[in-house]
Amino acid sequence: MHIVAWTVVVLGSALVVVTAFVLRSRLPRVATDLLLALGGLTIGVGGLLLFDDVSVVQWILTPLLLAVWAVAHARAMFAGAGPLRT
């Protein structure tokens, strides 16, 4: 089961990296945000598959929070002239 979990984590990570560095400038913002959120959600599910005793709350919150985090992180890192750029 761990090989499946790590495969899911790697696929989610690859989706986030490709979306952030390649597709971000080519796709509309909504499509980019959806792909980033899907990648974050996939990473969260893969991470939970690594554990044996996961509660329902963890199954709900972890993918949701990682989906939001992936979008927020990409927006902060690639903000252009935004406040977080030095």
Image: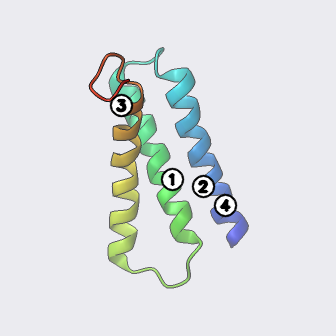
Residue 60 occupies quadrant: bottom left
Q: Which mark is residue 42?
A: 1
The residue located at (45%, 44%) in the rendering is 38
Q: Are marks 2 and 4 in contact (CB under 8 Å)?
A: yes
Q: CA distance from mark 3 to mark 2?
A: 21 Å
x and y percent of residue 18 in the render? 58, 31
Instruction: Look at mark 2 in the image and give the residue it sits on.
Output: 9
Q: CA distance from mark 3 to mark 1?
A: 19 Å
Instruction: Look at mark 4 in the image and give the residue it sits on.
Output: 6
* Closer to the eye: label 3 or 2: 3
Q: Residues within 10 Å of mark 3 (few under 14, many from 20)?
A: some
**85 shown above or below 49:** above
Residue 80 placement, left or right of 43? left
Where disc 4 sits, the SS reads helix
- Identify which amino acid the numbered label 1 is placed on: Thr
Q: Nearer the viewer, residue 76 or 61?
A: 76
Residue 10 placement, left or right of 39? right
Q: Are marks 1 and 4 in contact (CB under 8 Å)?
A: no
Q: Residues within 10 Å of mark 1 (few under 14, many from 20)?
A: many
Sequence-earlier tag: 4 or 3: 4
